[in-house]
Amino acid sequence: MTIQRLDNVAIVVDDLDAAIAFFSELGMDLEGRQQVEGLFADQTVGLDGVRSEIAMMRTPDGHGRIELTTYQHPEASAPTPAVPPPNTLGLHRVMFAVDDLDDTLARLRPHGGEVLREVANYEDVYRLCYLRGPAGIIVALAEQVG
């Protein structure tokens, strides 16, 4: 066997507090928050003089984690274009199953969560949508209805 599990997905954000608030409102729990710097950080991420702060967010079932990272040094670089379209190469999106899509969207809107187009119905089994989350990432939400 090659892997044991998917441990986490990291997302670089410019406002760590706002990102924590967004994912907390989504229903994730803040597992911990800490400064990261030193030789091990430089070696791991391949940058010199890394100084960052991370917050680890955990899904309610305890199996999924998102690591939110903000860089003090070197400064994070913005993608081009600043808000890449959904078909941009690389990490596409993070998807969460929710129990009430409408309520979740209402709670995320004050945190900047805006649906890209509209909520769609997939074969009367799921209601789905993409929305922009912290740092312009795409967060997908799915509510099982059938």
Image (spheres, grey):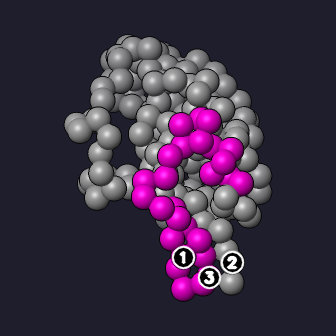
In percent of the image, x 22 and y 37: which residue is there? 80
Report the Cα–Cα distance between label 2 and label 3.
5 Å
The quarter of the rendered structure image containing the C terminus is: bottom right
Which residue is identified by label 2? Answer: 145
Which residue is identified by label 3? Answer: 125
Quadrant of residue 96 within the rendered picture: bottom right
First along the sequence among labels 2 and 3: 3
Report the Cα–Cα distance between label 2 and label 1.
9 Å
Q: Is 134 left, or right, of 65 in this rendering?
A: left
**Magenta stretch holds residue 125:** yes
Mark 2 element type: loop
Across and down, in percent, residue 2 comes to 49, 64
Q: How many numbered marks are there?
A: 3
- The disc at residue 54 is none
Identified by mark 3, the residue type is Val
Near mark 2 (Cα within 10 A), the count class, few <14, some 14-19 or many ≥20, is few
Q: Is residue 136 above or below residue 96?
A: above
First along the sequence among labels 2 and 1: 1
Direction left: furthest residue: 80
Q: Is residue 39 above or below residue 146?
A: above
Instruction: Please provide the residue range marked out in magenta.
Output: 103-129
Q: Are marks 1 and 3 in contact (CB under 8 Å)?
A: no
Q: Is 122 left, or right, of 82 in this rendering?
A: right
Which residue is identified by label 1? Answer: 121
Q: Which residue is more in the foreground, 47 or 132?
A: 132
Identified by mark 2, the residue type is Val
Q: Are marks 2 and 3 in contact (CB under 8 Å)?
A: yes
